[in-house]
């Protein structure tokens, strides 16, 4: 099975966000302090590596690409962030909660199939989540 690559969703960037074993994101907390957050690349694994005390439970974090600095905020629901996941020739949209302690991740396939992960994902609806065709990601730029 090919390695899952996580990419910045902005077409002019498309930086690999997991060059090693973790997904690396730039974060800004509610006090406007900036730092790096390392996430597990495994869907449903909510382990996070960050500076101790950087985020409080329930706090919403501003996540950005560490390369281009652009926001990863999901344009259809600001409580979520999004990145792309490429595995072989398949590109999916990964939408996940920006709130510390809220375990909700959605993997949206190009055909509209949605797989959810996390204990809070069953209680959350994301508007137009299956509208992958309107997503401005690399659907037409990565091997398609």
Image (cartoon, rainbow, N blue to C red):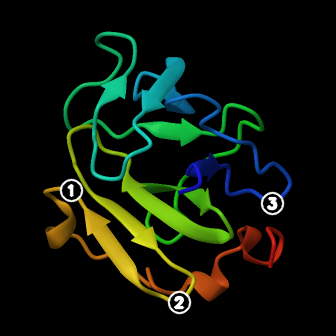
| Residue positioned 54% across, 67% down in the render | 93
Q: Is residue 136 above or below residue 94?
A: below
Identify the residue under disc 3.
11
Q: Where is 122 relative to 35, above or below?
A: below
The reply to whether callout 2 and callout 1 are in contact (CB within 8 Å) is: no
Where disc 2 sits, the SS reads: loop
- Pick out the residue farthest to the top: 52
Secondary element at image label 3:
loop
**Quadrant in which residue 83 is drawn:** bottom right
Residue at label 1?
118
Residue occupying the point 83% across, 70% down: 141
Residue occupying image coordinates x 34% and y 28%: 48
Q: Quadrant of residue 104?
A: bottom left
Instruction: State the mark number for residue 111.
Output: 2
Q: Residue 78: tell me if it is visible.
A: no
Task: Estimate the x, y position of residue 11 in percent, counting from the top left.
Answer: 81, 60
Can residue 140 be seen in the rendering of this structure?
yes
């Amino acid at each position: 099975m090919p390695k899952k690559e996580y990419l910045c969703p902005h077409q002019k960037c498309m930086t690999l966000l997991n060059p090693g074993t973790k997904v690396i994101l730039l974060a800004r907390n509610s006090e406007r302090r900036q730092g790096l957050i390392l996430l597990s690349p495994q869907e449903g694994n909510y382990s996070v590596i960050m500076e101790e005390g950087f985020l409080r439970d329930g706090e919403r974090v501003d996540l950005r690409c560490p390369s281009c600095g652009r926001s990863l905020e999901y344009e259809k629901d600001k409580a979520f962030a999004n990145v792309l996941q490429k595995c072989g020739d398949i590109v999916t949209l990964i939408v996940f909660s920006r709130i510390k302690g809220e375990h909700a991740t959605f993997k949206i396939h190009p055909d509209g199939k949605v797989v959810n992960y996390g204990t809070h994902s069953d209680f959350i609806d994301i508007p137009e989540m299956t509208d992958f065709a309107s997503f401005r990601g690399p659907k037409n730029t990565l091997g398609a």
